[in-house]
Amino acid sequence: EIVMTQSPATLSVSPGERATLSCRPSQSVSTNLAWYQQKPGQAPRLLIYGASIRATGIPARFSGSGSRTEFTLTISSLQSEDFAVYYCQQYNNWPAYTFGQGTKLEIK
Amino acid sequence: QITLKESGPTLVKPTQTLTLTCTFSGFSLSTSGVGVGWIRQPPGKALEWLALLYWDDDKRYSPSLKSRLTITKDTSKNQVVLTMTNMDPVDTATYYCAHLMIASRGVIIPFDYWGQGTLVTVSS
């Protein structure tokens, strides 16, 4: 089973600055990788799929990149509503749709 | 407009079987490319994918939980049911169902719509 490693566990960034989150699968997942945002008490929200395709209604400040075993989620200019936990998920290797352990993005 | 909602018991005893129902609207599970999955999240912990059911009745399960899980659908009622046997306190979590789509050219759009989740506590 693929292990998804997200780093850092916690990221402290000031509003208006750029945030860069990392996700590393233990083996290649091609570009079958998604990113989700989750706020306290809410269900996750799909941000990015196919490693770099923004989901419907997601602002352009969110971008994804990478392939195989190295992926990055970048938030170009942090807004107050962006502080949340972010999860990556691979959907390349059946039968598991494995999630990472999450990165908490907090206000610096 | 796609919506999903989970329902089921909020409290189960150890060794009991949990049955959760996902009732959805805005799509049909008889439409090619559509799937519904279940994901759970223990309090304060990460998401864990459990199972996935496709429009053609193809079913996939988490390898670590496969022996305990069963996923079924009732297309006429727009429902997907997940059963989990032999519940244990470590299974205490919020359980979510979510919509998935295989779009044109085989592009998978995973879990783009989610239910609000239902908290299940396992305790005697």
Image (cartoon, coloured by chain):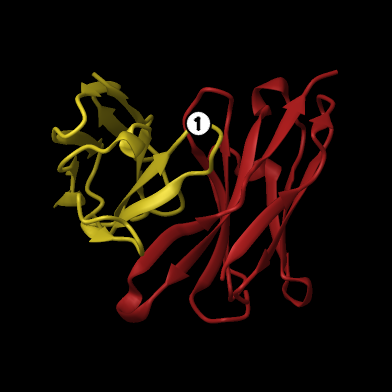
Chain colours: A yellow, B red
Q: Residue at x 75, y 31 (%)?
A: B87
Which residue is found at the position 16% from the left and 34% from the top? A16
Compared across the picture, whether B59 is left or right of A75 comes to: right
Question: Residue B77 location in percent, x, y?
Answer: 78, 72
Are there few (<14), some (14-19), or many (20+) residues within 10 Å of tag 1? few
Q: Is residue B116 above or below residue A80?
A: below
User: Quadrant of the image for the N terminus of chain B?
Assistant: bottom right
Residue B102 horizontal/vertical position (percent): 42, 72
Question: Does any portion of residue A67 appear in the rendered image?
Answer: no
Q: Judge left or right: residue B90 versus residue A17.
A: right
Count the numbered circles shown. Answer: 1
Q: Nearer the viewer, residue A55 or B20?
A: A55
On what subunit does the disc labeled 1 rest? A
Q: Would you identify the image quadrant in which residue A50 lies?
A: bottom left
* Quadrant into which the C terminus of chain B falls: top right
> Does dot 1 land on a helix, a strand or a loop?
loop
The image quadrant that residue B39 belongs to is top right
Would you place residue A88 above or below residue B60 in this image?
above
Front-lying residue, A60 or B20: A60
Residue at horizontal 58 percent and vertical 24 percent from the top? B43
Q: Amino acid type of disc 1?
A: Pro
Image position of A36 (left or right of A52): right
Measuring from the top left, give residue A28's x and y in whole percent: 22, 48
Question: Taking the image as drawn, is residue A44 in sight?
Answer: yes
The residue closer to the viewer here, A63 or B36, is A63
* Picture layout, residue B31 above or below residue B99: below
User: In the rendered image, which residue does mark 1 sit on?
Assistant: A40
